[in-house]
Image: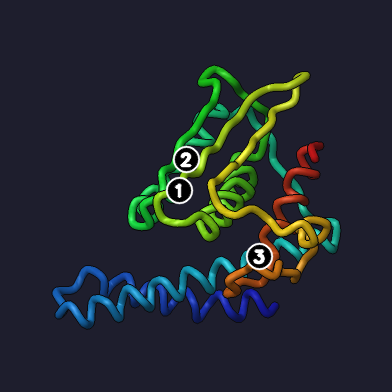
C-alpha cells in the first residue's frame, strides 16, 4: 500500500520533469530539472528495493528463467555505467565467453550485477579499473566483479549480506539493501 501511494505522486513528478527536460530552458533551470529527474530515479530505486525485501520476507520473491547470453548480460550492465565510469576516469572491462548461455531471469541478474558494479564504482578511485568476468565451472556460471579499490575491511566481511547494514567505509546514501537483495537473487537461481 505504501509503495503504491508513493509511486503515484512520484510518477507524476517524473513525467512533469521529463517534459521539462525537453523544454528550452536556461542552463541553471536545466540543472534543476536534472536534479529533480535524478531524485525521482533514486526514489523509485529505493521503493523497488523495499518492495523486493517485502517479497523476499513474504516468500513471494520469484525468478522467471529463460536462456540468456552471458556476454549480453555483462555488456548490458557495463553500458549502464559507462558514462559514469568515464566521468570518474575509471576503466570498465569485461572477460566473457561470447557463446555461453545460462537459464536465468535476465532482469534479476542485471539487478544483481548492477548493484555489484555500482558498489565497485563507489569505492574505486579515479584512474582505477573494474572488470566483470563470466565463466563456467562444473556447469555453473560464475560472475565476478573485481576492482582496484581498497577492498572490504576484514571485520565487515561477515556482514556484507545483512540487510540495513553498511560497512564502516560506506559513503552512506542508501538503505543498505543492495547486497542483501543480490544474495537472494542468486539463491533464487540456485546459486551462492
Mark 3 lies on residue: 49
Q: In this view, does 80 lie to the left or right of 156?
A: left
Q: Which colour scheme is used?
A: rainbow
Mark 1 lies on residue: 128
Q: Is residue 36 left or right of residue 49?
A: left
Residue contact between numbered discs 3 and 1, judged by CB atoms under 8 Å? no
Q: Which of 74 and 24 is in front in this view?
A: 74
At a point 68% along the width and 80% down the height, the residue shown is: 2
Of pointers 3 and 1, the one earlier in the residue sequence: 3
Q: Is residue 147 left or right of residue 78?
A: right
Q: Distance between the residues labelled 2 and 1?
A: 21 Å
Of pointers 2 and 1, the one earlier in the residue sequence: 2
Q: Which of 174 and 57 is in front in this view?
A: 174
Q: In this view, does 110 lie above or below 151?
A: above
Q: Is residue 144 above or below residue 122?
A: above
Of pointers 3 and 2, the one earlier in the residue sequence: 3
Categorize mark 3 by other alpha carbons within 10 Å: few (<14), some (14-19), many (20+).
some
Q: How far apart are marks 3 and 1 (CA)?
A: 29 Å
Would residue 8 be visible to someone looking at this image?
Answer: yes
Mark 2 lies on residue: 76
Categorize mark 2 by other alpha carbons within 10 Å: few (<14), some (14-19), many (20+).
some
At a point 47% along the width and 40% down the height, the residue shown is: 76
Q: Is mark 3 on a helix, strand or loop?
A: helix
In the picture, the quarter occupied by the C terminus is top right
Residue contact between numbered discs 3 and 2, judged by CB atoms under 8 Å? no
Residue contact between numbered discs 2 and 1, judged by CB atoms under 8 Å? no
Task: List x then y, in percent, for residue 25.
Answer: 16, 78
In the picture, the quarter occupied by the N terminus is bottom right
Amino acid at each position: 500500500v505504501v509503495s503504491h501511494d508513493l509511486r503515484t505522486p512520484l510518477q507524476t513528478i517524473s513525467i512533469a520533469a521529463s517534459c521539462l527536460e525537453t523544454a528550452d530552458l536556461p542552463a541553471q533551470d536545466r540543472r534543476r530539472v536534472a536534479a529533480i529527474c535524478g531524485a525521482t530515479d533514486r526514489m523509485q530505486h529505493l521503493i523497488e528495493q523495499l518492495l523486493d525485501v517485502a517479497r523476499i520476507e513474504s516468500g513471494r520473491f520469484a525468478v522467471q528463467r529463460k536462456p540468456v547470453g552471458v556476454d549480453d548480460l555483462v555488456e548490458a550492465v557495463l553500458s549502464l555505467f559507462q558514462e559514469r565510469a568515464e566521468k570518474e576516469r575509471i576503466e570498465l572491462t569485461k572477460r566473457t565467453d561470447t557463446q555461453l548461455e545460462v537459464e536465468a531471469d535476465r532482469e534479476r541478474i542485471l539487478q544483481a550485477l548492477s548493484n555489484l558494479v555500482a558498489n565497485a564504482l563507489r569505492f574505486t578511485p579515479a584512474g582505477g579499473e573494474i572488470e566483470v568476468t563470466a565463466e563456467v565451472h562444473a556447469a555453473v556460471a560464475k560472475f565476478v566483479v573485481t576492482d582496484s579499490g581498497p577492498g572490504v575491511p576484514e571485520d565487515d566481511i561477515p556482514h556484507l549480506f545483512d540487510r540495513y547494514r553498511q560497512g564502516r567505509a560506506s559513503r552512506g546514501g542508501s538503505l543498505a539493501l543492495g547486497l542483501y537483495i543480490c544474495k537472494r537473487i542468486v539463491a533464487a537461481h540456485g546459486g551462492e
